[in-house]
Amino acid sequence: MPALQKTMPNHYNFDQVIQFLATKGKQIYGPHFRIHVEDYEILFQLAVYFLKDKDQLKRLSLSPHKGILLTGPIGSGKTSLMNLCRFLQPEHQRFLVKPCRDISFEFQEHGYAAIHRYGKDSFQLIKGSVITKTYCFDDLGTENTLKHYGNECNVMAEILLTRYDLFVTQKLKTHITTNLNSQELENLYGNRVRSRLREMFNLIAFDKDTMDKRK
């Protein structure tokens, strides 16, 4: 990993980005929220990606055409950082954060319509313009395999495979947070999904010894 540079040379100063996100974090999560210095390198990569800093994207080997797969231990702050990074984007481009557990319950209630909601229904025609919904599926691997009228389905596997097809044909992006490593993802979703994840995502990983910030 290249050494962290504090200045983003195109348009943004990293210190200002940190200050902006820290302020936004306090608004959302309360006055106790803070960004930890040990997370700066992770946040720098995320900021470079969402602010589309071409020079730094190239330096960090991040593809602007892929989504983000953010991995790390429980309590490392994956969800809060991704939620904050939404505010680095123009409002009409902001992705939606959706817990995977909620999606599994949607399948239990609504069946395969829930899969379509996060697949082909990610494209909507509104007033003559195609509006794309980009999702961040939060805590991949924590969802349950539930049944709908007796039909069991690995819901997130189906959604990811569908979104992979749309990534290839329509350049649809997806973001993910997870506590799982690559082998655990393969065990849960199969080799086919793991292979697709490599193509769809830039991997950004917290150190496995990152402290639990919720304690």
Image (tube, grey):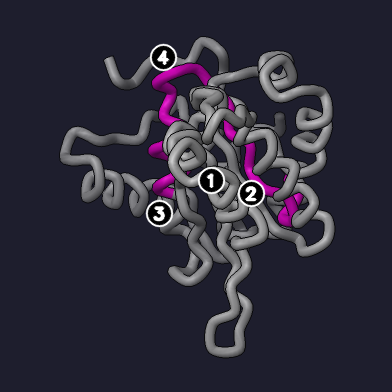
Identify the residue under disc 4: 211
Residue 2 vs 66, above or below: the answer is above
Which tag, 4 or 2, sits closer to the chain's start?
2
Cα distance between the residues tagged 3 and 4:
25 Å
Residue 168 in the image, given as x and y percentages of width and height: 83, 55
Amino acid at the residue labelled 1 = Cys
Q: State the residue position of label 2.
A: 174
| Identity of the residue drawn at 58% across and 27% down | 71
Name the amino acid, label 3.
Answer: Gln
Do the residues under discs 3 and 2 have CB atoms within 8 angstroms?
Answer: no
From the image, state whether disc 3 or disc 2 is nearer to you. Answer: 2
What element does badge 3 sit on?
A: helix
Image point (71%, 33%), residue name? 2
Q: Residues within 10 Å of mark 3 (few under 14, many from 20)?
A: few
The earlier-in-sequence mark between 3 and 1 is: 3
User: Which circle, 4 or 2, is nearer the viewer?
Assistant: 2
Q: Quadrant of residue 208?
A: top right
Q: Which residue is mark 3?
A: 16
The magenta span reads 62-84
Q: Nearer the viewer, residue 66 or 47?
A: 66
Q: Residue at x 70, y 24 (%)?
A: 189
Residue 136's disc is 1
Look at label 2 and name its amino acid: Thr
Q: Nearer the viewer, mark 3 or mark 4?
A: 4
Q: Residues within 10 Å of mark 1 (few under 14, many from 20)?
A: many
Element at badge 1? strand
Direction from residue 15 to residue 183 in the image, left or right = right
Q: In the structure shown, which secondary structural element does the residue marked by tag 2 occupy?
A: strand
The magenta stretch spans residue 64: yes
Q: Is residue 205 above or below residue 116?
A: above
Q: Say which label, 3 or 4, has the lower sequence index.
A: 3
